Image (cartoon, rainbow, N blue to C red):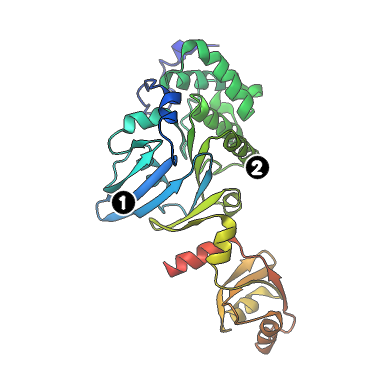
Amino acid sequence: MTPLNERLGESVGPAAIPAAIPSQGLAADVGAAPGPAIIADHLVKRFGSFTAVDDVSFEVARGEVLGYLGPNGCGKTTTMRMLLGLLRPTSGTAIVLGDDITVDAERIRPKVGYMSQRFALYEELTAAENLAFYAGLYSVPPAATARRIDAVAERVGIDVHRDTRAGQMSAGWRQRLALGIALIHEPPLLLLDEPTSGVDPQARRAFWDIIYDLAAEGRTIFVSTHYMDEAEHCHRLGIMNRGRLLALDSPTALKATAVSGPAWEIFASPLLPLLDALGRIGGIEQFRLLGDHAHAVTVRGAHDEASLTAALRGLGIADAVVRAAEVTLEDVFMALAGRG
């Protein structure tokens, strides 16, 4: 196997590599800055005439798993890059672990583990070599590097692939290695930008188990996603659309407050005439296909099971079966985005 110091001289990884990050007394800095891990204050980011982030304010408590849910292009990544000091806000600011992003960005980065949508892995290096390389960038003391690599490899479950080149790993293992890189300098705050995009459901579940373990240790997790099922795992959830933060609360509270009325499962065959009928009934706020049936949300007080069944049958859906259903985060998003 080619030695690490020789292979690092090759052009094997991302074109842009961060400069070595000096150690700044992580434990002392974090301990000296009590309060929320993140305070975003009226953040705005414009690119020419396009507003990517539009007057966003929120706080993230220490030890919290805060989710950022929204479609691609809604401003999630831009928000994270501003919090890291990689993009300067057009207006507004944020305090991250006690430091202002517009003044002290260089103090923030050593205290944050960032996992981008495109994992910054060097494909010709093994998992262990990638971890060693990033440990050097984050100025992990040489005497502690081997211990850190062992601890991170065990934490993210890549012990069996320590000597596997990153380019030969499956998407799920590459994802774990990328998380390990974000953890190598033991940061108190993790920014994870759609970390499970493109991996299989089993790998996604395993990844979220690791996130919960990290939060239980007191780390703060700020994670973006466009998967509704993942959003359910967060302590609190911000709903983003078109650059605006539409709501921020626990998933349970969002379902109770953002959607005005009850939800229903509606079974009938064929489905297309059922959808047409739902579009002609008053008091229905939203409806969509959901597998082998339709899912609808009605205005509060507009319908019960019997009245909705009768309305459908009056429109020729003779076999309609209506059952009460749980409000979903997709219902929440559609309700909030529609109002926006």
Q: Is residue 235 above or below residue 63?
A: below
Q: Is residue 118 left or right of residue 331?
A: left
**Could you tell me which residue is drawn at 33 percent across and 50 percent down?**
43
Total marks in image: 2
Q: Nearer the viewer, residue 150 or 98?
A: 98
Secondary-structure class at tag 1: strand
Please identify the residue farthest to the left as the structure is shown: 48
Closer to the eye: label 2 or 1: 1
Say which amino acid is labelled 2: Arg
Q: Is label 2 in contact with label 1 (beta carbons under 8 Å)?
A: no
Decide if residue 37 is on the left or right side of residue 261: left
Residue count near mark 1 (Cα–Cα under 10 Å), binned few <14, some 14–19, many ≥20: many
Badge 2: how crowded within 10 Å, few (<14), some, or many (20+)?
A: few
Q: Is residue 318 above or below residue 5?
A: below
Residue 76: horizontal and vertical position, in percent?
Answer: 43, 48
Q: Position of residue 228 (x, y in %)?
A: 57, 54
Q: Is residue 183 visible?
A: yes
Q: Nearer the viewer, residue 15 or 188?
A: 188
Q: Which mark is residue 44?
A: 1
Residue 32 to residue 59: above or below: above
To which quarter of the image does residue 264 belong? bottom right
Q: Is residue 158 visible?
A: no
Q: Amino acid at mark 1?
A: Val
What residue is pinned by disc 2? 205
Report the residue at 44% width, 39% height from top.
37
Is residue 128 or residue 214 the one in the foreground?
214
Earlier in the chain: of badge 2 and badge 1, it is 1
Rendering coords of residue 50 (x, y %): 29, 55
In this picture, residue 109 sits left or right of residue 265: left
User: Judging from the image, what secondary structure is the residue with disc 2 in?
Assistant: helix
Quarter the C terminus occupies:
bottom left
